[in-house]
Image (cartoon, grey):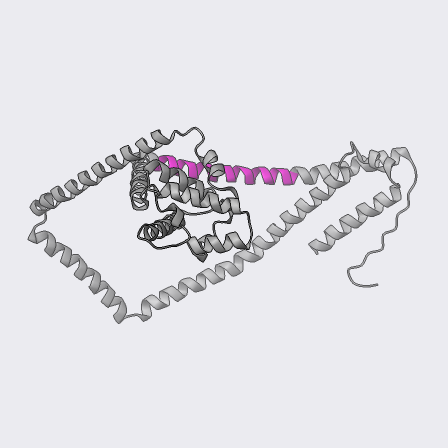
Amino acid sequence: MAAGSYIVLIKFVGDTSSLSKMEKDMNRRFNKVTKRFGQGLAKAGKMIKFGAFAAGAVSILTSVLNPLQEINSALDNILAKSGNIKDQAYNMDTSVGMYAAMQSAAAAKGIDQAQFNMMGQRIMELIGAAKNGEDNVLSKYKNEKDMGLALYKVVEALKNMGPGAERAAMASQIFGGRISGRMSGLLDTGFDEPLTQVMQGVNLKELENAVKGLDEKSNLQSALRANLDLRDIVAKNGIVSNHTIAMQNRTEEYKLNKENKLLSDYKTPADMQMALYDLQIKYYEKIMPLVTPLVNFFNEGVDLIETVYKIQENTNSLANVFSKEDPILILLKICSILKNYLDRGR
């Protein structure tokens, strides 16, 4: 007989009381296993919950100790964003509201701000050249004053051409191959569809006023911080003395002396580091043989529970299973499952 092989002999007697007893016995055994694993999972769940609680506590403690950090960060971000929108709108020769709305719409189609700015730059270059008498692909837009509106019209014209090689060539000629390759989504729909999405509940005039208002506050913030820096220079001049500089130099000297000492006897810290590596390796070698079986046992236990669940799925008891399928086949299946489970544990 081959090693590790089994011969399973089953003698089935069609007795209802025997089936009932078998069902109760198997249910008792499976319930015992699932109960133990359930307790283990519950403990693990408690540990996870504790970890989540600890992380939350650290976050709360950080907020308590530095309550303004998050608020100041949000304030700085929105002021910087508003200032950036206004500056970029000025560079594109369009209104603040137009720039903010169209840039957001382009972002909804996978075009980032830098790419959008390059699109606007190309429109300005070609229309500027057309105004100076050059005959190019955008000559018919040479009378446009708002470059944001001109960009909108150019994209609409490309959308109306429909997808294909001709549109791709035209887009590449206008915006360059790198940018036009990112514009397929926008060229399929134009600006109207994404503008409708991003501007829901937003009034264009109110948006423009908000950006301008926050940009003014950003300028005020910069001015006040510059003033604070200047006053701090004056204040520190009255605080920093020759003794302060001498003490600073002394601490740096101590730091260098320590570094030179370590370099002069490099073998000692190197030996200490290698000893720590050895301890880590030994710890790993000792702990892994203990942890691995536990992990494997847990995985096998979960597999067994899942197997039992599948056997009992959509039935109220094993008796119901037996009533739906040949009992001998059912017992063979159960024995096969248990055999595989035991084989994995060997």
| Left or right of 236 in this view: 296 | right
| Left or right of 80 in this view: 321 | right
Give me the residue at 21% from left, 63% from top. Answer: 256
Q: Quadrant of the C terminus?
A: bottom right
Q: Where is residue 77 in the image (x, y as percent from the top left)?
A: 32, 40
Q: Give the range drawn in magenta.
A: 36-62
Toward the viewer: 29 or 337? 337
Toward the viewer: 204 or 128? 128
Give me the residue at 37% from left, 42% from top. Answer: 148
Using the rendered view, name the quadrant where residue 45 is placed: top right
Q: Position of residue 35 (x, y in %)?
A: 66, 37
| Left or right of 154 in this view: 73 | left
Give me the residue at 43% from left, 38% from top. Answer: 54
Magenta stretch, overall SS? helix
The magenta stretch spans residue 182: no
Residue 29 visible in the shown view:
yes
Residue 245 against residue 148 in the figure, above or below: below
The magenta stretch spans residue 39: yes
Q: Position of residue 280 (x, y in %)?
A: 45, 60
Toward the viewer: 217 or 132? 132
Q: Position of residue 156 (x, y in %)?
A: 47, 43
Give me the residue at 57% from left, 57% from top. Answer: 289
Q: Quadrant of the N terminus?
A: bottom right
